[in-house]
Amino acid sequence: MKKFNLILVLLVFGLIMFISGCGSSSSGGGTQVTAIYVESSVITEFGGTIHVNQNNSGGAVITDATVTVNGVNFPFNPVNNTYHKWQEGFHVNAGDTVTVTVSWNGMTVTGQGTMPYPATITSPISDSSHNIASATDVAWNFGSNPLPGYIEVSGTDPYYGSDSLPGNSVNYTIPANTFTVGDGGVWVYAYNDGYGFTGPAGTGSDIITRQESYVAVVWTN
């Protein structure tokens, strides 16, 4: 009788564990996965990088999702734990819609953004020379095209990067004595972001799209 009771207890315990496992979408450490967190570090006209995690930005990396941008598959890159594509078979024009779709574990999330227009850099002039002891005035415009959400300015060498600037900004000054003598350049990056996702997307999921403009500069003293 005792043996029968022990078998019955084990059967009931096993059934409870089986039901509990079937009713959970857990993955790794018993964490229940109810959302897919998606963050595109940058999607440019030629490709980009997308982070996919369980639930939120701090969740486990999802390595086996199906990720597409405008219908083009972005394969998983185990080197940096992201989904990545560059140039081959991918191109988005300025002003076009960018659609990111991520499917995993029976869930699908979709987000849309717009590729910004590139800035036209009017200062410094491409291939001009500039004394490193003087500040570098960078100026640009977007003509009649829509303005981006925000702008960043950078230069080399060594690397210098500005904080984010409002989308209607038209100039920025890089401080004197920032660069060393030699060949370098100045970039103006136009960004759009803040687009939401449909489906069970983790809080904060977004799409960041970027266009870049560049002029070569020779730094002198």
Image (cartoon, helix red, strand yellow):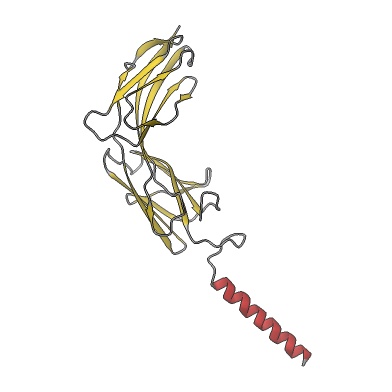
**Residue 71: image location, x then y, percent:** 33, 52
Quadrant in which the C terminus is drawn: top left
Q: Nearer the viewer, residue 154 or 157?
A: 154
Report the number of discs.
Answer: 0
> Measured along the vertical axis of the image, is residue 12 above or below residue 99?
below
Q: Nearer the viewer, residue 100 or 37?
A: 37
- Quadrant for residue 209, please give it: top left
Quadrant in which the N terminus is drawn: bottom right
**Residue 55: image location, x then y, percent:** 51, 56
> Measured along the vertical axis of the image, is residue 184 above or below residue 46?
above
- Quadrant for residue 207, please give it: top left
Which residue extends farthest top?
221
Residue at (44%, 64%) from the top-left corner?
106
Which residue extends farthest bottom?
1
**Residue 117: image location, x then y, percent:** 28, 34
Residue at (34%, 37%) from the top-left corner?
149
- Quadrant for residue 187, please give it: top left
Q: Nearer the viewer, residue 149 or 154?
A: 149
Which residue extends farthest right?
2
**Residue 8: image location, x then y, percent:** 69, 86
